[in-house]
Image: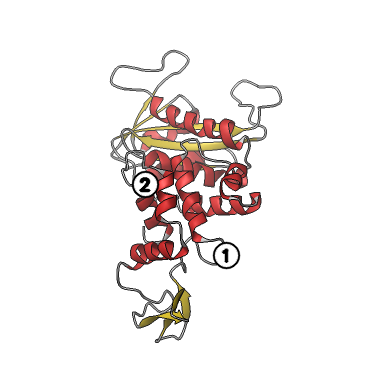
Amino acid sequence: MNVISIVQQFGTQDSCISLLEQVKWQGKPYCPYCQSEDVARRIKNNENVGRWNCHNCLSAFKVTSGTIFQGTKIPLPKWFAAIAILLNAKKSVSSCQLARDLDLTQPTAWYMAMRIRKAMQEDGAFLRGIVEADETYIGGKPRGPKTPGQRRESKKAPIIGAVERGGKVKAISAPRVTTKLINHFLRRNIDPRAMLITDQYPGYNEARDWIYHERINHSKEYVRDGGIHTNTIEGFWALVKRAISGQHHHYTLDWADRYIDEASYKYNTRKSETPFADFMVRACGVA
């Protein structure tokens, strides 16, 4: 995706509003409060002020109502540029970098990036076929002694994920990795008719009760005949960790899901030929 072309095409407030109206309403504007189509554009001094009036509930609204842009005072061209920059950055972009690129304060850039990442949340569709699941820890360096069967996970954010080979990935952060949480995540996101592949971590043992389950012992091998491996999910973890080491350096568990949503969304849309247009559908709340 060419960021310059996005900036040039949507360099004015009117051009941004026109796109949002097209994506959200598709030629049939309606009131976001009562859903009535008896609405009219508000014109002041022969100029479009970006507001609409509803003749049914007498409300005033904008096309940005119900979108990630709702209530913003930041010009829409900067929002569109921020979206293009984030979508184009495989390893993400820090709020400091975004602030420099768009002439914003760091808190404003962080706020915008978090709203954009919120729109990247995935749907609830099941993963099917061959599915690899794994857990990892991201963040600060491990501290304290490591005892047998226990990970040194101090100040690290645990992440649980599953990926459909050739398809989508789903991942969430967690306060701690437990058998109960792992199985809740797997049941919620994987079709029971799929084939599940994991490592030898005991937390996956209960999965054999409801799904065909293969395990790979990484102390002996990384790939077994029949395509038994977890290399796909390990590759996704590498992308997540490179975004931290190369851009963010650190983020807390409170916001980890937003960054994981971003990494998952980019992985899942990696083959899209129209990433900006696809994201705008989500940004307008019509995904």
Q: Which mark is residue 73?
A: 1
**Which residue, as the protein is rendered here, is positioned at the far front?**
45
- Horizontally, residue 246 falls left or right of residue 232, namely right
Q: Is residue 262 above or below residue 216?
A: below
Q: Disc 2, disc 1: CB below 8 Å? A: no
- Name the residue nearer the viewer: 131 or 70: 70
* Residue 50 x, y percent position in the rendering: 46, 72
Q: Which mark is residue 181?
A: none
Residue type of the residue flagged with mark 1: Lys
Tell me the residue that label 2 is attached to: 275
Residue type of the residue flagged with mark 2: Pro
- Name the residue nearer the viewer: 39 or 164: 39
* Residue 286 x, y percent position in the rendering: 37, 61
Query: Label 1 crowding class (10 Å Cα cut-off): few <14, some 14-19, many 20+?
Result: few
Q: How many marks?
A: 2
Marks 2/1: CA–CA distance: 25 Å
Q: Is residue 220 above or below residue 121?
A: above
- Going 36% across and 75% down the picture, which residue do you hit? 30
- Name the residue nearer the viewer: 91 or 211: 91
